[in-house]
Image (cartoon, rainbow, N blue to C red):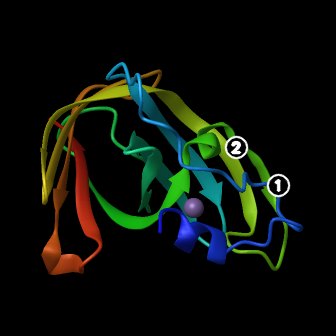
Amino acid sequence: MPLEAYKKKRDFKKTNEPSGAVKSTRGNTGKNTYVIQKHQASHLHWDLRLEMGGVLKSWAVPKEPPKTKGLKRLAVQTEDHPVDYAKFHGTIPEGQYGAGTVEIWDSGSFEIEEKKPDELMIDINGKKLKGPYALIRFKKAGPKSWLFFKR
Ligand code: MN
């Protein structure tokens, strides 16, 4: 069930994160939400989120995402988030999943150029990240590991 893993991890009486819903993809214009949230949890990381199929597909990137070519970043896929999550920033209270601060590091839209099971070619139109990017599965580092880089 969509967003089940997301909901299971959170107590919405205690966190301000959106409880969320799957967004209708009807009338989709092809421009989808892109956001990166800087998340100071037990370990600092950047959460890359891309709207696909009515949810935000999500990856945790342990180092700052690259603005230029030449740097490849590990991106570990995490649970799908509701599309409303793209607007979330603030503090997740202590004791809750992902406790710490969330700030919107970059936002905008993206378009899919090519989508294969192990490869996603996208064009990002954000404020910090702009242009062609790739997400490529990196199985050597684990079943949820991808590499994220500018092409
Ligand atoms: Mn996170």
Measured along the vertical axis of the image, is residue 58 above or below residue 141?
above
The dot on residue 60 is: none
Q: Earlier in the sequence, mark 1 or mark 2?
A: 1
- Amino acid type indicated by mark 1: Asn
The x, y position of residue 77, in whole percent, is: 37, 65
Residue nearer the viewer, 104 or 86: 86
Where is residue 144? Give x, y as percent.
29, 73
Question: Could you give the CA–CA distance between mark 1 and mark 2, rounded to whole angstroms?
Answer: 9 Å
Q: Residue at x 82, y 62 (%)?
A: 15
Task: Give the x, y percent position of residue 80.
Answer: 47, 60
Please state the horizontal and vertical placement of residue 32, each as a whole percent of the image: 40, 29
Residue closest to the eye, 134 or 50: 50
Q: Nearer the viewer, residue 90 or 33?
A: 33
Q: Is residue 43 left or right of 114 when viewed as pictured? A: right
Q: Give the quadrant of residue 129.
A: top left
Picture layout, residue 145 above or below residue 143: above
Instruction: Check residue 16 in the rendering and tell me which mark sits there, or answer none.
Output: 1
Q: Quadrant of the C terminus?
A: top left
Whether ligand 1 has any atom under 8 Å from the Cβ at mark 1 is answered as no
User: Ligand 1 quadrant?
Assistant: bottom right
Residue farthest right in this picture: 13
Rendered view: 18 above or below 24? below
Rendering quarter of residue 112 = top left
Q: Secondary structure at mark 2?
A: loop
The answer to whether residue 63 shows anywhere in this view is no
Q: Are marks 1 and 2 in contact (CB under 8 Å)?
A: yes
Q: State the residue at coordinates (47%, 48%).
A: 55
Q: Amino acid at mark 2?
A: Phe
Residue at 81% from the left image edge and 55% from the top image edge: 91
Q: Report whether 123 appears left or right of 136.
A: right
Residue behind mark 2:
88
